[in-house]
Image: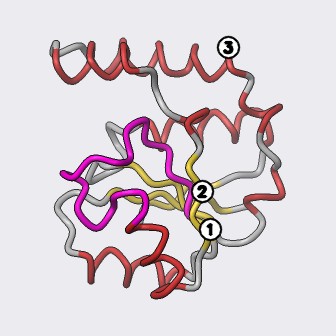
């Protein structure tokens, strides 16, 4: 099973939605904690749901269960925490939340993408979510758009 991931920073709306459309995405799962900021531009929650539906024929879902806590974000972003600490804390949070028990694996049968803001998946929790689910559900591959 393939799970796509994508970030919206450093991307134009045209490039962003073209990548989704070319991948055949049918569902976007927003894994951001804060998805209503004006700084998100075209990726602001209400606008994104409209654009996905109209431009890609895709569904929008916000899943805060797959987002880090505000404390984790602040420690990493505002207080220059290490990626290693953030990664460990986030993996522990996913385990504590038992996300594999709260998500339906069938949600990922249709082409689905996890959205966060980071330009690449290397230092983004969206990659960690896929790795976590793959370790529990097996047979999953992450493809970063």
> Tag on residue 144?
none
Along the viewing direction, whichever of 123 and 42 lies nearer the viewer: 42
Residue 95 image position (x, y, % from top left):
67, 18
**Residue drawn at point x = 34 percent, y = 56 percent:** 7
Residue corresponding to mark 2: 61
Residue 10 lies in what quarter of the image? bottom left
- The secondary element bearing badge 1 is classed as strand
Count residues near mark 1 (Cα–Cα under 10 Å), then give few for <14, some for 14-19, many for 20+: many
- Quarter holding the N terminus is bottom right
**Residue drawn at point x = 61 percent, y = 59 percent:** 3
> Tag on residue 27?
1
Count residues near mark 2 (Cα–Cα under 10 Å), then give few for <14, some for 14-19, many for 20+: some
**Residue drawn at point x = 33 percent, y = 62 percent:** 43
Query: So how many labels did they put on this image?
Result: 3
Residue corresponding to mark 3: 96
Instruction: Note whether 48 is above or below 82 in the view shown.
Output: below
Q: Earlier in the sequence, mark 3 or mark 1?
A: 1
Q: Earlier in the sequence, mark 2 or mark 3?
A: 2
- Gap between marks 3 and 1 measured at Cα: 26 Å
The residue segment tinted magenta is 28-46
- Gap between marks 2 and 3 measured at Cα: 22 Å
- Quarter holding the C terminus is bottom left
11 magenta-colored:
no
Residue 109 image position (x, y, % from top left):
78, 66
Relative to 111, is 51 on the left or the right? left
- The secondary element bearing badge 2 is classed as strand
């Amino acid at each position: 099973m393939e799970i796509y991931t994508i970030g919206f920073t450093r991307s134009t709306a045209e490039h962003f939605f073209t990548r989704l459309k070319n991948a055949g995405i049918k569902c976007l799962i927003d894994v951001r904690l804060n998805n209503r900021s004006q700084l998100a531009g075209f990726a602001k929650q209400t606008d994104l749901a409209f654009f996905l539906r109209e431009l890609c024929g895709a569904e929008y879902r916000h899943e805060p269960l797959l987002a880090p806590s505000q404390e984790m974000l602040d420690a990493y972003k505002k207080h220059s925490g290490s990626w290693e600490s953030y990664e460990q804390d986030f993996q522990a949070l996913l385990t504590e939340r038992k996300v594999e028990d709260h998500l339906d694996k069938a949600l990922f049968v249709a082409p689905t993408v996890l959205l966060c803001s980071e330009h690449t998946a290397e230092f983004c929790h969206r990659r960690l979510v896929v790795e976590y689910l793959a370790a529990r559900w097996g047979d999953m591959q992450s493809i970063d758009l």
